[in-house]
Amino acid sequence: MSLDLSEDYLLFDNLTSVTLKFRDGSPDELINGKALRRAVTFREAMASNGKVTTSDVHWHIPVDGLNKTPTLGDKIVHGSTEWTVLVREEQTLSTRLRFTCRDIAITAGLDTVIKIQSSTTQKEQATNAIKLVYSDLHTNVRAKIQFVSGTRDRQSGRDEMVRKWAVSFEQTFAFSPNYRIVGPDGVFYKPVELRDPDDIGKPFVVICEAYP
């Protein structure tokens, strides 16, 4: 007598479809009508010593049919919500995967929509002057903008207050010196420092200086 539990998983109610998004750039993968979402219990949250919380969720996905198995930091997308994978576990004799996931946009309060732009140099034909021209790289990006600190700067010959802001993102972006962030009020933010780019359980934070 052979024991096959691989199809027992499909007897659950409320199965749904999700999309897997991979950090390494691999093609997205659709799990059509075979994903199950469950809440993280209070007992599980307490036992994790703060690693997971009751606002996190478990996503259950069958192994059969997966082209690529998600790993830590990959995302499970359901509707408009992107859940970041914090923990991966094999269950039901390795026929099913359970992913503990977090909606970083909610936990980090990403309540602002911004744009990320990059610049190129162009020479004006009439004056031969060099100017910067910006173009959009990413639009409608969810973020949170917070004031961090203000320090006095006298190096430029003027007594000015340099204000720094922390811009938090749900995902990691590769910033370069010619990038800028455009806030919803038209203020520009120049990145000067990156924080926690590889901490999958927290937002990606960019420290910026603001200018009109």
Image: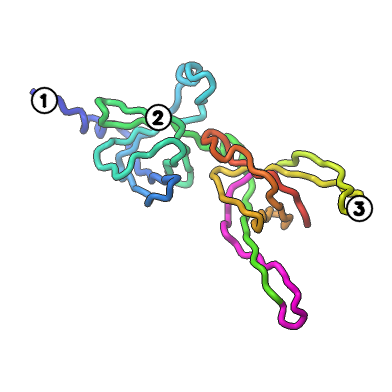
- Asked if the residue at tag 1 contacts the one at tag 3, i.e. Cβ–Cβ closer than 8 Å, the answer is no
Q: Answer whether residue 117 is magenta in the image.
A: no
Which comes before the other along the chain, label 2 or label 1? 1
Judge by depth and name the residue closer to the eye, 203 or 123: 123
Residue 57: x %, y % from top left: 45, 31
Figure disc tally? 3
Helix, strand or loop under label 1: loop
Label 3, residues with CA under 10 Å away: few <14, some 14-19, many ≥20: few
Amino acid, disc 2:
Arg
Q: Answer whether residue 127 is magenta in the image.
A: yes
Main secondary structure found in the magenta portion: strand
Task: Give the label on residue 158, or none.
Answer: 3
- Asked if the residue at tag 1 contacts the one at tag 2, i.e. Cβ–Cβ closer than 8 Å, the answer is no
The colouring scheme, among rainbow, by chain, secondary structure or one colour, is rainbow
Left or right, residue 206 beside residue 173: right
Residue 84: x %, y % from top left: 47, 38
Residue 162: x %, y % from top left: 82, 47
Q: Which residues are magenta?
A: 124-145
Q: CA distance from mark 3 to mark 1?
A: 81 Å
* Rendered-image quadrant of the C terminus: bottom right
Left or right, residue 153 beside residue 115: right
Q: Nearer the viewer, mark 3 or mark 1?
A: 3
Q: Which residue: 21% across, 32% down?
A: 6
Judge by depth and name the residue closer to the eye, 183 or 70: 70
- Asked if the residue at tag 2 contacts the one at tag 3, i.e. Cβ–Cβ closer than 8 Å, the answer is no
Going by the picture, which residue comes out furthest to the bottom?
A: 126
The residue pinned by badge 1 equals 2
